Amino acid sequence: MAGTPVGPPRSGTGRPAGPAPTAPWRGIAVTAACLAAMAAASLLLWDRIPELVTTREATPARPGTEVPRAVAVSAVPAVLLLVAAVLAASALGGRAVRRRLGAAPAPARSAAGALDAPLMLLSPFLAVLHLVLLLLSAGIGVPAGRIMAVAVGLLLTGLGSALPGAVRAGAPGPPERPAAAAWVRAQRPGGAALAVVGAVSAAAALVLPPLPVAVAAALAAPSVYLVVSVSRVLGRGWSGRWGGAA
């Protein structure tokens, strides 16, 4: 009688599966690299930035606003650190809630994978924003609106590409309910639609007025994603499952 083979767990490729990551190391590495780039740019441009940076020009109806140079230079890096802290706190809070509810904890690989995508996408975006603000504060003329409009489009493209994997990674296991399973499957077409909106807006921002393009993309992206995802759920998820159960 043949016994059950004993050995290390194997991945889908037949090779032994490596240890599951317990932290979003890829996201942490990208965030650290972006923070280092922000610090380097700040040091290089520090002497060219005035001690008081104007953040709002004065008009006859309202006074202008100025902030110290240190505040202007550290604002965006502080936002990135805050985002990373909020994501880490949300992960810890989710674990605590699951323990209080008596639910099984999410696998370490799932928890790490769900945090990797936002860190890897938001960090470069904020680094670009930081560099643009530094250059403007230093009196160096750059097409800030066009650069940031393209960055918004690329951010949406990255979100659309990463969304299916992040949703699967955030799920503690295979969805048991038909609606949940259909929603997970719908992330692929929904994410693809979001990526297309981002790519089109990034290309359009190179030749069209950047501010309207960025605003239109930011408003259209969630609507397109929801319409495509929900239509896929209603058309192929629930109908197929409930029809089979009838």
Image (tube, helix red, strand yellow):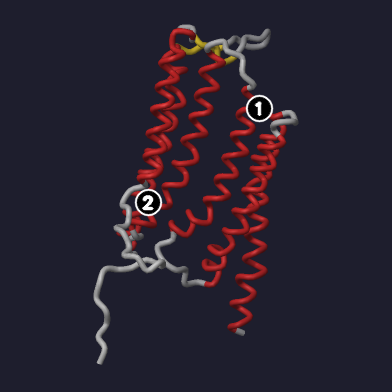
- Which quarter of the picture shows residue 186? bottom right
Q: Secondary structure at mark 2?
A: helix
Residues under labels 1 and 2: Cα distance? 34 Å
In the rendered image, residue 54, in percent from the top left (x then y), is placed at 55, 11
Residue linked to disc 1: 146
Amino acid type at circle 2 is Ala
Please state if 25 lies on the left or on the right of 72 as rendered.
left
Amino acid type at circle 1 is Arg
Question: Is 206 or 78 nearer to us in this picture?
Answer: 206
Answer whether labels 1 and 2 touch (C-beta < 8 Å): no
Q: How many marks?
A: 2
Residue at 37 percent across and 54 percent down: it is: 111
* Marking on residue 112: 2
Residue at 53 percent across and 63 percent down: it is: 184
Residue at 48 percent across and 54 percent down: it is: 166
In the rendered image, residue 35, in percent from the top left (x then y), is placed at 40, 29
